[in-house]
Amino acid sequence: MKRQIAFISEHASPLAALGGVDSGGQNVYVAQVARHLSNLGYQIDMYTRWDDPSMPQIVNWSPGVRVIHIEAGQKSFIPKEQMLPLMDAFTKNMLSFMECEEIEYKLIHAHFFMSGLVAANIKKRKGIPYVITFHALGEVRKKFQGEADHFPPERYDVEKKVAFEADKVIAECPQDREDLINLYDVNPDKIIMIPAGFSPHEFYPIDQLVARNVLGLDPKEHIILQLGRMVPRKGVENVIRGVHSLIVKHDMSARLLIVGGESDDADPKKTPEIKRLLHIAQELEIENHITFVGRRDRNQLKYYYAASDVFVTTPWYEPFGITPLEAMACGIPVVGARVGGIKYSIREGKTGYLVSPENPEELSERLRDILSNPQLKLFFKQNAIERANSLFTWANIAHSMSRLYEEIVSLTDISVEDTMSLIEHNFEQLIESANLSRELLQIPIADAAHTVAHALSRGKKLLACGNGGSATDAQHFVGELVGRFQIDGRKALPALALNADPAIITAWANDYSYDDVYARQVEAHGSPGDIFMGISTSGSSRNIIRAFRRARERGLITIALLGKQGGPARNLADIAIVVPSLDTTRIQEIHINIIHTLCEVIERKIMSEQLDVESSVQTLNLFSGSYNPIRQTHY
């Protein structure tokens, strides 16, 4: 039985074409989070305003996700700035739909402040808890846009009410969290930070020449990419002026591709912002260096990222910003404005550069630095791919959302039906994780088992350690080796659990640092040819990392039992067994299965070698006349 969750996204539907005035990051966000939550066993109903009479009320958008159109005003496009008075009708008609369908949601996830108002009203009527992702805050927007901000003045009061009544408020980056606390007095304990993400199935490195060939671009030209909604606050004018400075001041030729708009042909008549930007380019006499591409389908965007040398985004403000992540995932350096979520997603000097949002001279200098230095581009590329994939995949975001949902629902719902549903869900997730691990991990598990068995049979020893639950796993593994797993009569195998010595751990941690407690023991007990096994669900614990480094320094063979992306420990291990899951609980469950498998293989291999030795001894005794069958041991 799937848990039903309602999404409310009044103006941003996954069905909308991207690149328009009101179609951008939020549309991508709700679509991807809903799709990945459905992969985790949720049934998502996404409520959005009915703005196209040709669309049916219910669209089965993807497995487990429905888009439900709710009447609120006329069935035509209405700017989001004018929608607040329509939210009473939205609430009424959403409740009517729920009653007709006899749906009782366990939780509502509201997106944007107006959706939050609907969720708050439904909570009053039905008692359904809700969380909210604001995606943008009115006070921040007003600070940067001034009179260009056309939302009604009561937006602030609505946002403050919605945040106060929400069960949890999701901040997308540290700046978002600070703004919620400082501008809206939101209780910090109510805020949880979950960023936006990207799909590695959509965005990944592609050879630049291949991408340029697909798009018909010059293979030798420097290409700068700007991609996003065509509205003034996105700062595209600043990018154009920065490219002008690059050409005139730094004498470096480049082409700026601008992707986005209301039409596929970048018609200035259909997109006023393109008309304004084109006029600026003509005034600067660089229109021949700029290509307005127009709106493009998402399946084409990876080629634009891959074809570029650098991606630029310099908005006045940005609650998070998904396009920098997509560019990083494609291995493209990013120069972004030092605002909002961009200054969180970009690592300054590692994946690109941060610049002031309205400083074209600073932008041009950073563009020159990247375009003139191929080694720097390669350095940024490698770091960008690693950072994007380790922190910002939609699968990772969905797991974080799921944990938040279950925490909230568990406080309000203890029915037998949902208990059984949760039990079934957990078994399904375990089976899914186990099946995927079976496909991917057989070879590293076999390598680890044979390596350990070979070392132990030559008189070497195994040192194992972990933290928390992984510490228990290390002790369990060592206990099975020293004692026995399944076969009686075998010799004890030399193994130590480093985390099982509280005297050295507490003494060293108290006098020096907990970060070195395992490295110190490796130094004391480890010898060349011994085995060091570090167990960690993340691979990022400092004490485990330092122990791996010390083991390598001393000539030990290193084996890592990890999860998630493997963390830094993955690259420090001679053999890395990385469970393909982001859920710590599932990782620990698979770890214990792997440990049992290792025990069984090691034990059988050791016994096989022991039997071979005894057989050889018996043969020698037989030839020498001293063979005594009474002394045989049967296994």
Image (cartoon, rainbow, N blue to C red):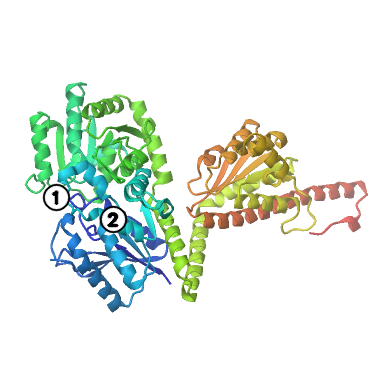
User: Which label was assigned to residue 360?
Assistant: none
| Secondary structure under the numbered disc 1 in the rendered image | loop
Tell which circle, 1 or 2, labels the residue nearer the N-terminal end: 2
Residue pointed to by mark 1: 262
Q: Position of residue 494 (x, y in %)?
A: 75, 45
Closer to the camera, 328 or 441? 328
Q: Position of residue 72 (x, y in %)?
A: 18, 67
Q: Nearer the viewer, residue 193 or 47?
A: 193
Task: Give the residue number, with chain letter if any, for mark 2.
Answer: 159
Q: Residues within 10 Å of mark 2 (few under 14, many from 20)?
A: many
The C terminus lies in quadrant: bottom right
4 left or right of 308 in image: right
Q: Position of residue 214 (x, y in %)?
A: 23, 42
Q: Secondary structure at mark 2?
A: helix
Q: What's the residue type where badge 1 is placed?
A: Glu
Q: How many marks?
A: 2
Residue 536 seen in the figure: yes
* Percent x, y of residue 511: 67, 35
Q: CA distance from mark 1 to mark 2?
A: 29 Å
- Would you place residue 550 above or below residue 262 in this image? above
Task: Say which of 192 and 622 sits in front.
Answer: 192
Q: Quadrant of residue 11?
A: bottom left
Q: Is residue 112 visible?
A: no
Q: Is residue 133 left or right of residue 238?
A: right
Residue at image x 63%, y 53%? 595
Instruction: Tell me which amino acid carries mark 2.
Output: Glu
Residue visible at 38% across and 63% down in the picture: 38
Q: Quadrant of the N terminus?
A: bottom left
Q: Residue at x 29, y 67 (%)?
A: 121
Q: 575 or 87, which is in the foreground?
A: 87
